[in-house]
Image (tube, rainbow, N blue to C red):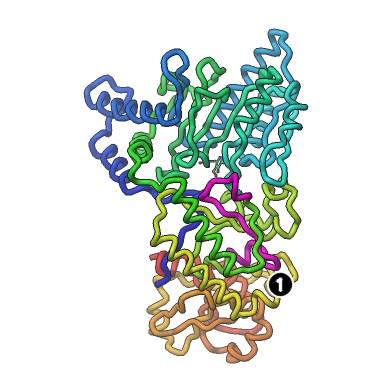
Amino acid sequence: MTHEIYLDANATTAVLPAAMVAAQHAMAALYGNPSSSHSTGLVAKAMMESVRTRAARLLGAGQGDSAGRLLFVSGATEGIQTAVLSALVALRERRARGEAVGNLLLYGATDHKAVPESLAHWNDVLALGFEVHALPVGQDGRHDLDVLRALAPQAAMVCTMAANNETGVVSDIAGIERVLVEAQSRALWLVDCVQALGKLPLNLAATRIDYAPFSGHKLYAPKGIGLLYVRADSPFTPLMAGGGQEGGQRSGTENMAGIAALGAVLAALDEGHTFRTMAQLKGYRDSLVARLKQAFPAIVFNTPLDHALPTTINFSVPGLPSQTVLNLFDAGGIRVSSGSACSAAKAEPSFVLVAMNLPEWQTTSAVRLSFGPLVDDAFVAAACAAIDRCAEAARSSGLLTHQPTSHEAPDTDAPTMDGSPAPEMSPPDLQSFFTRHPTALLIDVRETYEHAAAEPWAVYGHVARNVPLSQLATMGQSILADRERALVLFCRSGNRSRKAAQWLLQAGHKRVWHVAGGLALAGPSGH
Ligand code: PLP
C-alpha cells in the first residue's frame, strides 16, 4: 500500500492529536456559550480567554497600555478583510478631516491573493478611489526597499507578508519598518503572518505593525479558526456586527472547538516538547534538498535557502512542467503543489515566481514542497525514498530524456472528442463488477511515468494495465483491439479517465466505464 508522504503543509496541515482531543473536550464538556452568564457559559469563556492570553504572550501582543487586541476570527482571509476595512474606514475619516492621506494602497507583489483582492474589494465597496499598487520584489523574493522608500510618502496603507507561502522567503520586516519610520509615514501597515506562526519569532507589540492575521490550519489546528492582532490604538472597524461577541469587535458566537484546538497547538509551541527546532528543520530541509539534487541533477532551486523558512522548498526541473512533476509525485504517494492551493486548479505560471522575475521555464515548472515542524526522521527518510522511486520511474519511462516540448499538462493533451457522457462506475461497485465480468480489463490511463511510480493497483486479482490517455490512439490499437471487451478506466481524479472513456466510445467500443473520482477516492486512502 502506498504510504502517503504529505509535503504540502503550506496549503494546510493535519490536526495535532492533542488539538483533536481539546476540540472534542470543548464540544463534549465546554459546550456553553461563552457569552452566557451562567456557570456553563463561564467555564467555556474561561477556556477561551486562557487561549487568548497564551496567544497574546506567544505573539508578543503587548501588555498594559500597549496591549493590542487579539480577536478570534475564522481564518486569515477574515483577518485580512477586517484589517483592510479598518484601515480604509480610518483613511476615509482622515481625508474627511482634511488630513493629507496618500493615494496608494501598497501590497507586496508576492502577497497571497487575499491581500490585493481585499484591498481592491473594499476600495470599490467604499468608493474611495485609492490606487491599489504592487510593491515589487527582487530575484531573492524580498521587497524592493528602494521602491518602498520612493513610494512611502504616497502610501496610505502598506501590506507585506512575514514569509511567503510559495517560496518560504522571509521578508525583511525590520528593513521595511526602518523605511516607514525614516519616511515618517503614517501609512497603516498589515503584515500577513500566516506562514510565520510557529516558524519565526514574533514580538508584535515591539514593532510598528498595525494588523497581523493568522490562520490555525497552517499549524495543526483545524480549518475555520484564526487570529487577528490589532495594535493598541490602531484604527478598528468590526467586519461583523450582531450580538457583540469578542467585545463587540467580531460578532457571532465563537468557534469554541476551533479555539480549544488552537489553544492546544499554542500550548505545544509554548511548552516546546512537540515541535522540532529551527536547526532540526534546517537539517531535514538539507536532506531533502540533497536527495532532490541526486534524483534530478538538473534541478534549480527557486527558494533562496539562506533567507527562507526551513520548511519550504520550491524547485524547477528543466523540461518538466509543474503538473508533470505533481502527477509523477502524486502517483508515487508524494503530495506537493505547484504554488498556492487556491490557484492549484489553474495551469498558470506561479505569479510569485513571475514577480521574482525568474525565467519563464522556472515559473511554469515550479514545484513547492513544504512540511510542518512536526516532521521527524522517519518521515524525512520515507520522503527521500519516495523521491528516489519517483525519479527512477521518471528515468525508466524516458521522462527525463524525452522531454515534453509543451508546457501543457498531459491531462490536457487528450484526443479531441465531444459529447456523449461516459458511464461512471463508483469505487464500491468495482469488485462486484469484476466478479461478474472476469474478462474485463482494468486500464490506468495515466502517463507511463505515473504508472511506473505507482504501486500496482489490482481489483479482485485484475492488475491494472497502462494505456496513457495521450497514447490512446496509438497504443490502444493493440491492447484495446477487441471492441466488445468490457473496459474499466481510471486515473487519479477521474478527469482523464472520463475523456479516455468518451474517446473509446466514439471509436466504437461498446462497454466502457470509468472510475468516478479516480484513484484518489478508490485507492487505499480513499476508503
Ligand atoms: N496568507 C497566506 C500567506 C496564506 O498562505 C494563506 C493560506 O493559503 C492565507 C493568507 C489565507 O488563509 P485562509 O485561507 O486560512 O484564510
Give the magenta part as a residue range.
Answer: 304-326
Residue drawn where x is 70% and y is 58% of the image: 362
Extreme top residue here?
97
Instruction: Decide if residue 16 is on the left or right side of residue 301.
Output: left
Is 87 placed above or below 29 here? Answer: above
Q: Measuring from the top left, give residue 259's x and y in whole percent.
A: 37, 35
Badge 1 amino acid? Pro
User: Which residue is label 1 attached to?
Assistant: 404
Q: Is residue 305 magenta?
A: yes
Is 323 placed above or below 172 here? Answer: below
Q: Measuring from the top left, give residue 387's x and y in whole percent.
A: 52, 68
Q: Image quadrant of residue 526?
A: bottom left
Q: From this viewpoint, is residue 296 visible?
A: yes
Q: Measuring from the top left, give residue 426's x and y in whole percent.
A: 45, 69
Q: Is residue 358 magenta?
A: no
Is 93 placed above or below 462 here? Answer: above
* Figure quadrant, ligand 1: top right
The mark tally for this picture is 1
Q: Secondary structure at mark 1?
A: loop
Q: Measuring from the top left, give residue 306's x and y in whole percent.
A: 59, 47
Residue at disc 1, CB closer than 8 Å to ligand 1: no
